[in-house]
Amino acid sequence: MIDWTAFVTVAAASLLSACLLVALYALGVRLLTSTGDLLPRTRRLAGVACFVLCGALVLFGIYLIVPALHGG
């Protein structure tokens, strides 16, 4: 029997995390390539922070997928 509640939960979490990852990456690219009201150093720092968050999300996803990393 399929547990539909768990299926919908996993599907929603996957969709949300994928959208967040793409949005952070796009924001990082936008901050590093545009000129605006922010100071160049602030834009660069914010862009790099977006990329660091992207990397952290990817590593967390790998941690969740690979059971050997859980110590069990």
Image (tube, rainbow, N blue to C red):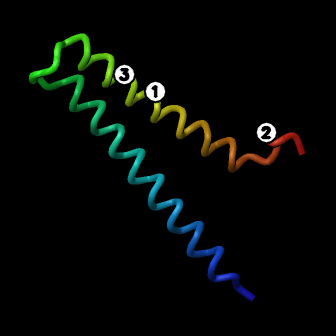
SS at badge 2: helix
Q: Report x, y in % for residue 9.
A: 58, 70
Q: Which mark is residue 48?
A: 3
The residue under label 1 is 52
Q: Report x, y in % for residue 55.
A: 50, 32
Nearest to N terminus: mark 2 or mark 3? 3
Q: Is 33 situated above or below 54?
A: above
SS at badge 3: helix
The residue under label 2 is 69
Q: Quadrant of the C terminus?
A: top right
Q: Check contact, mark 1 vs mark 3: CB within 8 A.
A: yes
Q: Quadrant of the N terminus?
A: bottom right
Q: Report x, y in % for residue 39.
A: 17, 14
Q: Report x, y in % for residue 27.
A: 27, 36
Label 2 to label 3: alpha-carbon separation: 27 Å
Residue name at image x 31 percent, y 25 percent: 47
Label 1 to label 2: alpha-carbon separation: 21 Å
Which is nearer the eye, 61 or 49? 49
Nearest to N terminus: mark 1 or mark 2? 1
Q: Quadrant of residue 63?
A: top right
For the residue marked with disc 1, what is the amino acid?
A: Val
For the residue marked with disc 2, what is the amino acid?
A: Leu
For the residue marked with disc 3, what is the amino acid?
A: Val
